Amino acid sequence: MPLLGLALATQLASAGDLPDSKLTSGYIDPKVTQENIHSTVCVKGYSKTVRPPSHYTNKLKKTQIIEYGYADANPQHYEEDHLIPLSIGGSPHHPQNLWPQPRLSEWNAEKKDRLEFKIYRLVCDGSVPLDEARQAMAENWIAAYKRYMY
């Protein structure tokens, strides 16, 4: 996507659609590499084996809603989401890889979930290198959506 397109994608996103990079820059699980994806992330059910418990993510979500300064502080309106998805080797527990993603916006958690599945398939079938996918998600998941979903 041309740089103008990336800038436009960022401008069209509402506050909160993209995480604050100072608070959530993305963080990878160093145990997942391009060389071992077929014995880690590309194994069916892998994400369930590393997903943090809900008591951890619910507590972090409440803290991060305050840190993000969201006017709407209702935790039910957010999904505590991994910026770099577990399905491509994002860190399960590191707070720099988790953020309270709004459920009630155009660029919501449901839309990001669709991208996560698509990018997982592209990584596992060899169409997109693991590091490229991780970087795209960390830098601007909305631009990644426009790149990989269209």
Image (spheres, rainbow, N blue to C red):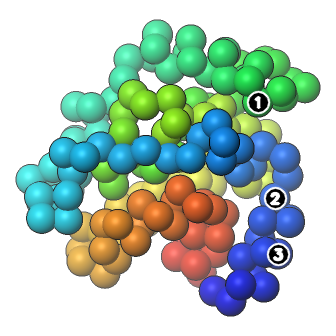
- Please tell me whether mark 1 sits on a helix, a strand or a loop: helix
Mark sitting on residue 8:
3
Distance between mark 3 and mark 1 Cα atoms: 23 Å
Distance between mark 2 and mark 3 Cα atoms: 9 Å
Residue type, numbered disc 1: Tyr
- Residue 114 visible here: no
Residue 63: x %, y % from top left: 66, 16
Image quadrant occupied by the N terminus: bottom right
Q: What's the residue at 51%, 67% (across, down)? A: 136
Distance between mark 1 and mark 2 Cα atoms: 16 Å
Q: Looking at the picture, does residue 50 appear above or below residue 112?
A: above
Q: What's the residue at 73%, 38% (across, down)? A: 102
Ranked by sequence position, the earlier of labels 3 and 1 is 3
**Front residue (pair 102, 129):** 129
In the visual, does 16 lie left or right of 2? Answer: right
Residue, disc 1 = 68
Residue, disc 2 = 13
Residue type, numbered disc 2: Ala
- Please tell me whether mark 3 sits on a helix, a strand or a loop: helix
**Front residue (pair 82, 122):** 82
Q: Looking at the picture, does residue 116 appear above or below residue 97?
A: below
Dot 1 surroundings within 10 Å: few (below 14), some, or many (20 or more)? some
Residue 61: x %, y % from top left: 62, 21
